Amino acid sequence: MNGSGIIRRQQIKNMLYSLIAFSIIFIAFGAVVFNQVRSSLFSKLDDELTTSRRIMEELVTGAEWSPAPGPGPGDAPSLFGSIRSPRVIPLLRDLSGSVVNFGSVSSTYFEQYLKSIPFDETSLNTIVFIKIRNLYFFRSLTVPVKTQSGEELYLQLLINADSERSLLLHISFIIAVSIGVFTVLSFLASFILSQKTMRPVKTAWNRQTEFVENVSHELRTPLTVIQNSIEALLAAPQEKIIDRSETLGLLLNETERLSKLVTDMLTLARSDGTMTELQKDLFSPDLLIRAVCEPYAELAESQDKNFRLELDCPANIRADKSRIHQLLVILLDNALKYTDPKDDITVGSRLLDGRVCLTVSDTGIGISDAAMDRVFDRFFRESGARARDRSGSGLGLSIARWIVERHGGTIKAGHNEPKGTIITVMLPKS
């Protein structure tokens, strides 16, 4: 399956998941804000109705008054003159629902607006919304009352809610627009976030693809050599081992190369997954360098190469001793591999800007400017004179960079003067 297609589909899924999550959050937030605003707006009206109900009930039950048939404002001032909230309009209804008193409002106001208010006996003791002439909105509370003379009536209290409803509609519009705007912004944010979250996946995928391709290429050569050598041995079973010593030697070399390649690939695979933990100890880098360089000094002498140590680091470092040993082996192997007889190899150490500086320099064939930035890439091997020895896998310096970076240090390659290469490693001291 195409890798880019898989990654794109996963990116779209991540974007949709983020968009849905953002949308749910915005809608939930808008709903909470709307309900809180609505509750706050109408709670004041409802409190006024509740307070006025208590006052009105006391007035009605304590008054020596009997309503005349039909509505009339005659006794309204004396009956409802102590209304605490001027916004509350009281109506008295008989048991059939007809209005028998409409409080302190004018008869014109009553005829134009209040007369058409429907009476719903099922909504007693409950604050409800009512609409008058499809234009005006009121909060209404209807309760049963009894006068001092025993007359049973219904007391209906009204309070206008047009301004609160208008404000609520305006706020709901603002919330709806805000949700729409933020949903669009969340779409853009989801797209950007999905790209950012998939970036390391893309990098890992590309590195994995490149790694598999390079591994396949690197394994093919030793496996082919081993297969051909074994086939040659099987073709002449009567021959003695001494007659096939050259073929067996080739088999041994390729097997060792294959084993080292697998070990290096396993190291890099573990480094990608952060599976390898460092076992840090406090030690002197100079003592470790001397111990590691001892066999390489003898090897350099056997190859007629000049090997020198210039160690001047009094500080200790806290690091994984085996990994630093591996780092030095990689750098020394490369120095010996790419130098000729009479060339110089120098290993140095010193304190520089509060850090431990390790250098491995040589006067060998060097590295071209074009390849200088890629020498630490996996499986990279420079073409030309430096590639005359193809025994390497191109993984050594990649492992070296991983070791240094895991220790919080830096590694870089440069040109040595007058010729050759110098590898500089900077590590934090203890």
Image (tube, rainbow, N blue to C red):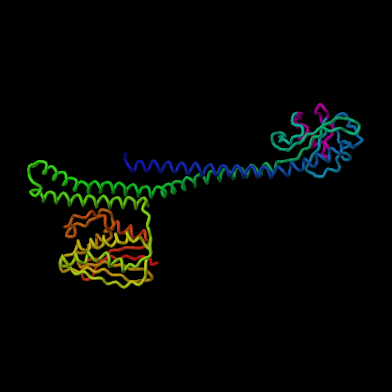
Magenta residues span 94-121
Q: Check residue 119 for magenta coloring.
A: yes
> In x, y percent, where is residue 319?
37, 62
Q: Check residue 191 for magenta coloring.
A: no
Front one among 313 and 35: 313
Using the image, determine if residue 276 lies above or below residue 118: below
Residue at horizontal 88%, vertical 33%?
A: 147
Figure label count: 0
> In x, y percent, where is residue 358?
31, 67
Residue at horizontal 24%, vertical 63%?
A: 332
> In x, y percent, where is residue 183?
51, 44
Using the image, determine if residue 377 lies above or below residue 158: below
93 with respect to 359 (left or right): right
> In x, y percent, where is residue 425?
32, 65
Residue farthest to the top, as pictured: 96
Quarter where residue 76 is shown: top right
386 with respect to 408 (left or right): left
